[in-house]
Amino acid sequence: MTIENYDWQAAEDEINGRKPEIETIEPDDDGRAEAGPVLVDDAEAIRSWKGPAADKREAILPTWATSRSGLLNAATRYGQLAAYRCAFHAVRVPVYGARLMAWAPVGTARAVGAVWRWASDAEGRPARADAVAGHDWQAYQSLARLRDRRVRWRGSVCACTGLGLVALGTVGALAAPPLALWGAGAAAVAALGLAGKPADKPLATRAVVKVKLQPLTSPMVERALSRIGIAALSSGKSEDRVNWPSPIREDGPGWLAEVDLPGGVTASDVCERRDRLAGALGRPLGCVWPEGKPEVHPGRLVIWVGHEDLAAAAPYPWPLARKGTVDLFDTFPVGIDPRGRVISGELMFTNWLVGSLPGMGKTFLMKLPLLAAGLDERAEVWAFELKGSGDLAFTEAYATRYASGADDAPVKAALQALRDLREECLRRAEVIKNLPRDLVPENKVTPELAARKDLGLHPLVAAIDEVQELFTHAEYGKEAKELAPKVIKLGRAFGISLVLSTQRPDKDSLPTGVTANVGTRACLRVMGQVENDMILGTSAYKNGTRATMFTSRDLGVFYLAGASPAPQIVKGAYVDGPTADLVAARARALRIARGTLSGYAAGEVTEADGPQFNLLDDLAAIWPGGEANVWNTTLVDRLAQLRPAVYGHWADLADEEKTETLTAAVKAYGLASKGVSRRSGAKQINRRGLNRGDLDTAREGRPGGR
Ligand SMILES: Nc1ncnc2c1ncn2[C@@H]1O[C@H](COP(=O)(O)OP(=O)(O)OP(=O)(O)O)[C@@H](O)[C@H]1O
């Protein structure tokens, strides 16, 4: 119990009234404590206890104003609101124009009436009438003289202004450009329309109706907590009251309440009842996000209540979807937390495990590390999708290994990948061991070593979607279960990362060696404690990290553990199919430029990937008869027709990219493209292409021969 939580009254009652039922220190044998039992809790001593005091400093700036992403989010929110208002009113301009025109005659009448009243000294009329009624003829005479003077003067002003306006109008009509005339006309109609506007009718329709959100208050939170079915919170006893270490404050687009729960109640007890808490607070479930702060103590509860339902909020677009590259030795964005702060993850020196019920967003989440790896041109990517849906087909553009399907072939390819990764781990370990100590101070791959092509220590990211198909496979499962933990444990330091996803997190489908050793865990909605802990780690459920609290509406929402000291709730960035293809095209271009496009994406197909065939043989097969030199663009189109599954995506590239892609792909076989000049109509066009003689030489010299 902290000093603030100490119940002074109860302590005093106990000391002064009832016989104390508290621990006592018995007198020493030597009789020094004869004066009676000494209380362990001396109320006076505790009351006068002075220190050491820990000053808790409140943040100078709200959380959202302390980070670039927070500021960016706030600016985006207001910018989007302003843009929405502009667009809303822009489409209604004709309606507003029609309203102004309809009101303009009334406005004209009102303007003429006002001028007339001013020119005829209408305001003096009541005074003159009073003078007549009171038979005060002297006053009347002076008021009448005043009126005459005013009418003369005001009449002249009106006449001059009228003549001036007519002259100005005539000159304007003859000399001013039509646009200015229309502008002046519109301004006049607008002014008269506004003058004639009925008082109860607004000109513009409201673009944004402000819904007054009720601020979160401490009585509200206390009342809600007392109604979620936790006995201690609803007992009403003073010792069962929650404590407030800091006041409720606005945090991003919502309110943040931090409370210390009474003894014996933990934050996870409340997290488990998130739906009841939301109900008791009268907010949509997607607005209420309780979480623990175990680094303070298990009873510290943080409740964030958002203005907007996270499940109904617009998907969060991946910041790297349109532009940007990734340095895998740094972090990359994976989503936002309920408060709108960008959450990042990393791939180097960590392995990923993604799990959830089917259809909650596993594959969408897996796309993020795979695309991030794609945007680091040093990284080699292997992707295996064992459901056969083609969800990871975007990686075909840049992956060194790719397999997809619901049959045995991709499962076998994934197993082969694990075998090869194990070998690669050993090779890399040997390379690192033989390097001078100063280059590998921590026996780990460094960015400098990863950049050296001669060492082969580049990042290698291997993803297996629906990995349960591999681990439960009758023939390959046993070996895969043995290999995966070894790769996870060993590969980490050598730049090899596994990204695994499963929709069946149980002990048969996921070896404990995997669950115990992965560093980054992402758990979308699961049904129970076992699945939760299989993905998020032992005791995660007990510690309040419960992906069971997500509902079926929380698509793409997950607990991310391992990316930061405490698990975080994240709404994953949304990358749809076409966007993934665009990013993949950038990943491919990066590799082509660096000369690192290899394997599957470069058209090389290994035995493990399927039937054996080869780019050089395929080129020979589609070579136009009798031609000595052929443009790369023509060859790529013919290759795409020959094997759409392998070369199909090349056909969609621009001519320049087709040329580059084939140049890079044949380079691996020691074949170089050269300038090929051809006549097209009256023009002579020069493009890069291949020579048949060079191709045959490369085929002869290929290991294994023709
Ligand atoms: N981050 C996200 N934001 C918004 N919606 C998302 C997000 N991630 C996924 N979704 C939605 O959830 C749906 C299911 O996603 P996904 O296909 O990744 O699920 P899954 O768990 O892989 O399913 P399965 O187990 O059947 O393969 C998607 O069609 C998408 O509309």
Image (tube, helix red, strand yellow):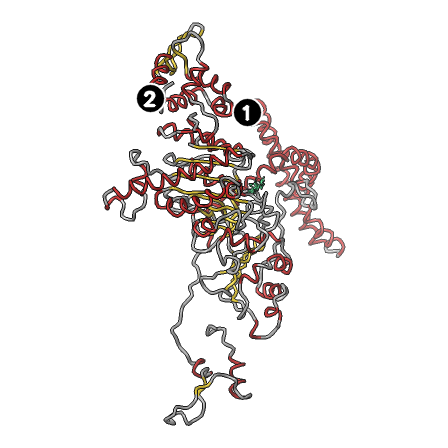
As measured in the structure, the alpha-carbon distance from the residue carrying label 1 to the one carrying label 2 is: 74 Å
User: 341 or 172: nearer the eye?
Assistant: 341
Mark 1 lies on a secondary structure that is loop
User: 252 or 181: nearer the eye?
Assistant: 252
Image-quarter location of ligand 1: top right
Mark 1 against mark 2, which lies toward the viewer? Answer: 2
List the residue tagged with mark 2.
670
* Ligand 1 contact, mark 1 (Cβ < 8 Å): no
Query: What kind of residue is marked 2?
Result: Gly
Does any portion of residue 256 appear in the rendered image? Answer: no
Q: Is residue 490 left or right of residue 578?
A: left
Query: What kind of residue is marked 1?
Result: Ala
Q: Is residue 350 left or right of residue 301?
A: left
Return the x and y of residue 101 as percentages of the image width and height.
68, 34
Q: Classify 71 as above or below 614.
A: below
Q: Residue at x 42, y 18 (%)?
A: 617
Q: Are marks 1 and 2 in contact (CB under 8 Å)?
A: no
Q: Is residue 403 left or right of residue 548?
A: left
List the residue tagged with mark 1.
176
Q: Please identify the residue farthest to the front as the structure is shown.
A: 475
Mark 2 lies on a secondary structure that is loop
Q: Classify 555 as above or below 230.
A: above
- Crowd class of label 2 (few under 14; some 14 to 19; many from 20; radius 10 Å): some
Q: Residue at x 52, y 77 (%)?
A: 7
